[in-house]
Structure formats: C-alpha cells, structure tokens
Image (spheres, rainbow, N blue to C red):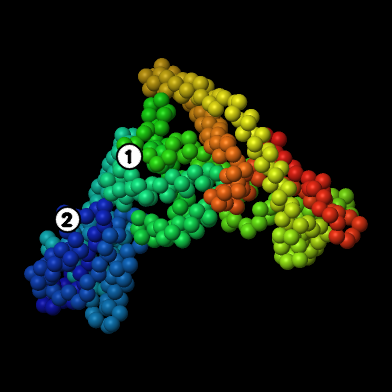
Amino acid sequence: MAEAAQSVPVVSYARISADTARDGHGVEDQHRVNDETAARLGWTIVHRYTDNDLSAAKASVVRPSFEAMLKALKVGQLPDGQQVRGAIVVADDRLTRRAGDYERFVDALTYDEGRVYADAKGPKNLYSEDVESMGLFGVVISKMEVRKMQRRTRRSHRRRAEQGIPVGGKRPFGWKDDKLTLAPEEAALLAEAARDLIAGRSLHSIQLEWREKGVRTVHGKEWGSRSLKLALWNPRLCGWRKHNGELVRDANGVPVQGKWEPIITPKEWMAIDALFSSRVGPNAKADGTITDYRTPSHLLTGILRCGKPKADGQICNAPLRVSTRPDLSGGYIYQCPSKSMGGCGGTARNGAKVDEYITEAVLAKLEERAAATRKEDADWGGEEELNRLVTKRQKMLQAWQQDLVSDELFFPENHKLETRIKELRAERTRHALQRQRAAIVDGDIRARWNSEKFDMAQKRALIREAMHAVIVLPVGGGGRRAFNPDLLVPKWKEDF
C-alpha cells in the first residue's frame, strides 16, 4: 500500500439504523469522527455518503449511498470528476454487516493501486490478505451479534404478547399514546364500523364515510381499504393479540387478554374474522358467495338472473342490468344484456316493482328466522369437545416432554388433535358470525330496513344470505303486460 500523502482525497461514510445504533452516535457524530481521523492522517474528505436509518444486516435493504460510494471508489472519481483515492468510516460495522457487502467494498477500493482506508483507530491496508481476512471475520462476528439481537427482540415480543403488554411503535388508532387507554372519538368510530361490517356494510362504504368526515390515520393520512381492513381485523379491538399470524394463547389454548381497554367484544371480533377469512378474492368468498366491494346503486344488481330458455333448453342465466326508463314508475328496469354482452336481451322487468316484491319476501324470511333464533340455544355446541381436546393435547405434550410418550406416537396423534382443534375453532368462529348476524334482524327489522342507517350494502348482504338468486321468467306474448310476481322465482338457501 502506498504511503498516505498530504491531501489524499477520500470519502466519508456514515450509517445508522433505528435498531442497531452504535453507542448513540448519529450520522453527524460519525462524520465528525471521520473528519478528525482525516485531519490526523492528513487526508481531505471530498464527499460525505450517508445512509440514515438503514440496516446493513438485511439483504432486502438497499443502501443508496453505499452503492454510490462503491461506484465512485471503483472508477476513482465522483460524478463531477473529483478524484477519490480512499474512504473513512468510524468502524467496519458502520460500513457492512454482511460478508458479501464487505467483499464488494474491498474489491471496489482495491480496484486500483494506492488506495487508502481508515477507521477511528487508524489506517488499514486492505491490500493485505491478513487485513482483509480479519475484516471478514469482524463481519461474521457482527452478523452473529445482529442475529442475537433479533432473537432477543423476537423473544421479548413473544414474552410481552403472552403477558398482554403492548409493544413499541406508533400508537394504534383508537387508543391514546399509552396504547392502553381508549381515545373516545376514534374508539367510537371503530366500534361503529365493526358492527356495520358485521351487519353487511362494505368496507368501501365505511371508507368513503370516513373520508367525508375527515377521519385520518394516526399518521395523518386518508384511510385506504387495506388500512381500514387491517384496523378492523386486528384482534386488539377485543383485547386479544396476534403473534406471527396466530392468536396468542395460554397453556390451555385460551386467548390471552391484553392490558388495554377493548373496543368490541370477542364474539364481534370473531365475526369479523370469519368474514375476512372466508374471502378468497376482492369480493368472492370461499363458499362461492359474493359480497360487494363497491356498493351498486340498485338493490338487486347481480342477484336477478334471466330465466328465458335457450335453444338447448337451458335458461340464459345472465345477470340482469339496470337501464334508465323515465317513462316507468321508479324510472328504471332490470334487463338482460344483449347477445354481444353475454345475455339474450329477451327479459326485462320494472325495477321498482321487482325491488318492492323481493324486499317483502326477504323481510318475511328475516322475521321468520329471527323468531326461530330466539327459540334456539345461543351457545355453540362444540365448546365442551374443544376444551376436552385442548386439555388432552396439553397432557400429551407434557408426557412427551417427560419421555413418557414416544415420538412415533406423539407426532401423529398431536397432528390429529391440532387438526380437529382448528376445525372446531373455525366452527366456533362461523357460529359467532351467525349469532351476530341474527342479532341484527332481531326486533323490528322493517323499521331498521327503512332507516337511513341501514344502507344498500347491508340490505344486499342480508338478501344474499337468504337466497342464491332470483330467476326472472320471461313474460311471453310480446307487448307490455301487468307486473306478475309469479314470474319471479327466488332460490332460497336451505340453511337460511
């Protein structure tokens, strides 16, 4: 390595990340130390590279300044033509924490002869294989320390979760800065949105209402559909918590109750969980039913189906669309699309009259169900079996840990228990949703249906729960005929 001459042009590099701060030194402190090192060695810093709040240990993190420095070192000059002959850092672990990055740095710096490198302790000859090896060894040690810190952090999070203690970070919407006490206005919004969602209201509808009211996230941004979904799907709302995607439970499998004030009940959150868990697309559910993402303007859009027979004897079955007809009462009709649009164009019906008839039929069904529900036991019938299996699993685990049960017996049996426990918990969740929905129609459903609070999305959700579709049979004979409700054939769901 060439002797360091006076005024050797070098670059200064500084980095800090939120989770791996070095002795409390920020990037400005690091550059100041680098200035002192340069002055002591007689070098001149011609450019400062800074990567603030970026980890050097994560492969997925790109450090723009680090990459720009490597490029400048390799070509020996900055983009403006200023010559560069070396680099200064506070310490190697501020530069790299991954072996690959350290090797890339050494390759760039030693691409030409006579380059210099130093940290706060003094200059290092990276052209020496021993020095490079020591540097790589330091990177390995640094990586091990990072992994230790990450493991300690994960264990800390798990321990805090099991104790029901909130973790760090920004306060969640609905709670004050202590993450324990409710923020009344935000909590009320979440509670109302959660119950509206259970009642069948769409996320999009709630999101639009919040935007109109000027409701902002804790970061001061407008609510999006994803952020609202995550907020309502968070088990924190009912006092529970997830860790690595699973509810945190005690030894008996019971969800751990957090120390913060809940906004809704566990049964309400389980109903929300059932809603979101059943969706396999933007508006498709696992059971094949459809929920609205954007609420249509008319009650039966997508629910009415054309019943006109085709040449092969099968019905058209195309979903009817809405067309404006100012000359008719109500001002619109439901009509089968043309052949070019996938329908037959042969069926149309007065929209307002169809809505009125189907509404009355559905309300009658809802009242019938509400009356039947009041007579049924509100408790889920599988609780005893679930508790028994959870206890059995715990005992088997203890026996296996004490070497009283062999691996050959434990793992297959434990897998069977886990599978059945998951099935029962899923059944319990679905039951909770059904009970919550049943509670909505309990009482004077007609008054609620006609109230402003009961919006289009909620009405359509209840209609879809009650029926698969409504087949609209053709009038026949040509010409305008009187409205005939017998030509509307509801396809009710058997388990409704």
Q: How many marks?
A: 2
Q: Which residue is mark 1?
A: 260
Q: Which residue is mark 2?
A: 24
Disc 1/disc 2 C-alpha distance (Å) = 32 Å
> For the view shown, which residue lies furthest in the left direction?
40
Rendered position, 455 above or below 432: below
Which quadrant of the figure contains the N terminus? bottom left
Q: In the image, what residue type sits under mark 2?
A: Gly
Residue 432 is left or right of residue 248, and the answer is right
Q: In the image, what residue type sits under mark 1?
A: Trp
Where disc 1 sits, the SS reads loop
* Residue 29, percent from left and from top: 15, 63
Rendered position, 399 above or below 485: above
Q: Earlier in the sequence, mark 1 or mark 2?
A: 2
* Residue 154, percent from left and from top: 32, 42
* Residue 442, percent from left and from top: 58, 36
Which quadrant of the figure contains the C terminus? top right
